[in-house]
Amino acid sequence: MISDLIAARSQMAMSLGFHIVFAVLGIAMPVLMAAAEWRWLKTKDEAYLALAKRWSKGTAILFAVGAVSGTVLSFELGLLWPSFMERAGPVVGPLFGLEGFAFFTEAIFLGIYLYGWSRLPPRAHFIAGLIVAASGTASAMFIVTVNAWMNAPTGFDIVNGEITNVRPLVPFLHPFAFHETLHMLLAAFAATGLLVAGIHAFLLLRHPSNQFHKNALVIALVVGGIPAILQPASGDLIARAVADHQPAKLAAMEAHFVTEAGADFVLFGLPDVSSQTVDYAVVIPHGLSLLLHGNPHAIVPGLDQIPRQDWPPVAVTHVAFQVMVVCGLIMAGMTIWAGWRWWKGRLEEDRWLLRMLLATAPLGFIAIEAGWVVTEVGRQPWIIQGLMRTSQAVTPMPGLWIPMVTFSALYILLAGVVVWAIRRHIAATMAVSPDQGVGRDTA
Amino acid sequence: MPSYELMVAAALVGALTFYLLFGGADFGAGIWTLFAMGRQGQPQRALIDQAIGPIWEANHVWLIIAVVILFTAFPPAFAVISIRLHIPLTVMLIGIVLRGTAFAIRTHDISSRSDGFTGAPPIWHRIFAWSSLITPTMLGIILGAIASGRASGPTDTIREAFVDPWLAPFSITVGVLATALVAYLAAVYLIMESSDPELRRLFRRRAVMSGILVIILAAIALFLTHDGAPEIYRGLVQTALGRATVVATALVHLAALWAVITARNLLARFLAGVGAVAILWGWALSQYPYLVEPSVTIYDAAPHSTLDILLASLLLGSIVLLPFLFYLYKLFKGDVLLHRHD
Ligand code: HDD
Ligand code: HEM
Ligand code: HEM
């Protein structure tokens, strides 16, 4: 049977990996809906109103799943990692507290937004949508700051092994927190925007002259595309922060075993820890030193500087990092292609573009999952970098494989259900001509 | 001035109070869905959907606020609770997940209409109803276990460590009491939400029945404290203040029943709420200053610098939030409370 530590880690990873999908949609979908509603207020074109309503109806289910899976997480921090929370609670607790209020604001205005179409004046309704978007963004900022603190803990002193002199506002100000939050938010908009764009590209391939889907495609490409182009730059910033605070993680990401000046950048490949080599890799000479320090001869510390028992799993971290970077480059490329087509006019007539948008639609979510694997697995064996090991944090509860299997089954089921529900929405969009019927059903 | 610890503990009880009054009633409404399956149940389901649809996500956040206060301010208590009560907590979480998802699917299915018709498969009504039943039961069991003192018992075997703390007559009774209480609150609230005399009669009858059940279960729970929760027994039965609290609580409940029966709907709503809060606060006061009987008190808390910021953010958050919350209820409940149908 698997060990309790592994079971706890798998359950945490699975719960977060599940929640993050809905959290991300919960951050970015309100912006898409608000953009459509804004276009409606500007142009008085009913097709935009229909679009906003259609999006909001599907999003309601996603929000509910996001809220309940987040609730599970708040408890799991204690259920699985009681000693972690005992130590970290006083320092990062206030961040969770602020997050609670962000959730509250979001839930209140979500109710108003979803059920208030006929009870509010249009402008007030639009503002309610903006507040939903702003509070979703705020909750992501608070929670990612907690994670940045786990990567680079600050705001306390250690006296005789005890955490004292807690300064709970300091974690906010750490540069790591800034880079990580920015990267996460860009990820949320890029992933959601391009996913929605992919779905409407698919529908346009079926119904080429449909104005409804043309509108949707353009809004989604703007909301998703701009962040997608900025994302590689933000990724570079966060990589430098990692190099400063977590050299072991950086070395694992880059599969950089030996400290050297003028380090190479290792693209792709499968690291082999026993022989300390990377098979099937493409090597860019001096690339790593150049990227991190702007100097092709800078020294980059390798894993040889880290005691062996403190190494993170190198292969997983490296491969996940490659997956994220490749997804990011493709997404930026797709955006540039679409932008160029739009510049030339008649974006929706390029069927190859539409096909490729469909094919690359899930990449943002793959990159998000991969990115979190880099962050979390790359931090191992620490749960709080340099301070507490994951193995010290786990609950003494035996038989943890039981909740792990239960929650896995539950989440697999839920994932299936959500896909089923959203498919019904998309199928209905295809069946009904959108100028009739769509507006009425949410009234 | 009361100590920081006391203020934070009061905030914790406050969050639980709101969760009981609002979130609890949402679960209660779900429980009544058990009796509203099939085609004849459609008007009842429509009433329930309309009543809780716009507000349940907001009501649910009170639980999250309570957990955050607990782990920020009282980490030792959070650790004990989440280790020793792992099993009922896990079942409760599964209930929360299923309840929220099932409700969202059934009300936001593409085919759903506001008259309660939904093309989503009927299994979602069942899941919604059963998870609404299980979740408050588990929460009650957890609170009962915390009060019982058994969470600090021996830990030599798996049974002693993870099962005995909560599997006892007292905590189970509190679990059933919590379930009856939320069902009762929901029934009382739903009388006013409907304009159909048939439905009003139905929920009035249900309110009376579940109200009587609450009184009986509360009496049994009180009786069981003698062996099952000695500290609570001491607080509620052996002190004059405790006895006065018990009597006052009982009187409020009787008054609420009277108001339900005589169709004083708004008064009934108010008194039922007060009665529910009285039960919760009676428990909290008799347990003071313990967070987990009989080992962890509210003074096993985070450093003052943390409590400071937590209190400040709770205060600030409330100032910003309460007007919003008020607006939400006014928007969707305003005409109900202004006797639109009376
Ligand atoms: C749409 C999603 C997406 C895309 C296209 C990218 N990332 Fe990313 N990345 C994330 C989504 C993400 C994430 C899931 O959101 C992470 C996890 C933690 C975080 O804050 O963001 C992340 C983490 C993360 C980390 C680890 C930070 C840590 O350990 O805390 C680095 C170094 C990068 N990213 C770098 C990049 C680079 C160089 C990219 C080049 C294209 C890139 N990311 C594209
Ligand atoms: C939302 C996206 C996230 C994902 C997908 C994710 C993923 C993971 C993964 C894969 C692990 C297991 C690590 C291993 O087995 O080596 C893990 C562990 C953990 N993560 Fe995250 N994580 C996310 C965000 C966060 C955040 C924001 C927090 C902070 C509150 C957090 C706290 C933890 C904790 C406490 C553990 C257990 C200890 C550990 O293994 O590091 N995670 N997570
Ligand atoms: C980086 C990772 C995370 C991000 C970006 C994130 C973001 C969000 C967002 C935007 C929401 C609201 C949207 C929705 O309801 O769908 C949400 C919900 C929630 N999240 Fe997360 N979250 C993350 C990880 C976590 C973790 C680690 C916890 C546990 C402490 C958590 C707890 C919650 C809770 C309790 C809710 C429900 C709020 C409600 O009832 O409305 N989240 N999250």
Image (cartoon, rainbow, N blue to C red):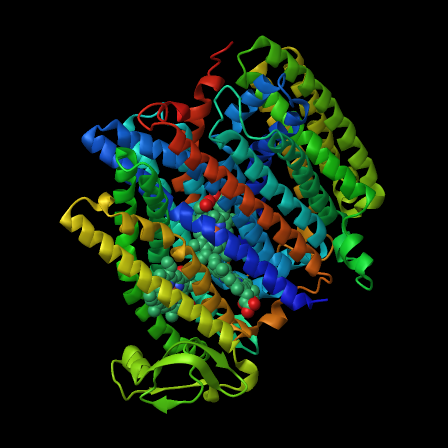
Quarter of image, res A414: top right
Spot occupied by residue A34 in the image (x, y as percentages of width and height):
30, 39
Asked if residue A4 can be seen in this view, the reply is yes
User: In the depicted view, which residue is nearer to us: B265 or A404?
Assistant: A404
Residue at image position (33%, 26%) is A120
At horizontal 50% and vertical 11% (from top left) the residue drawn is B341
Residue drawn at point x = 34 percent, y = 63 percent: A328
Q: Quadrant of the C terminus of chain A?
A: top left
Q: Is residue B156 above or below residue A127?
A: below
Residue at the extreme right? B227
**Which of the two residues, B224 or B102, is positioned nearer the viewer here?**
B102
- The spot of residue A5 in percent (x, y) is 65, 68
Where, by quadrant of the figure, is residue A53 drawn? top left
The x, y position of residue B311, in whole percent, is: 47, 51
In x, y percent, where is residue A413? Answer: 59, 46
Give the total of numbered labels: 0
Image position of B273 with respect to A292: above or below: above
In this view, the residue in front, B82 or A282, is A282
Q: Quadrant of residue B201?
A: top right
Task: Left or right? Give the position of B119 relative to B183.
Answer: left
From this viewpoint, which residue is outermost toward the left? A344
Left/right of residue A371 with respect to residue A396 in the rendered view: left
> In this rendering, would A111 be left or right of B198?
left
Quarter of the image with the N terminus of chain A is: bottom right
Residue B312 in sight from this viewpoint = no
Ligand 1 sits in quadrant: bottom left
Q: Tell me which residue sits at (41%, 77%) in the image.
A: A250
Seen in the picture, residue A433 relative to A177 is either above or below; the reply is above
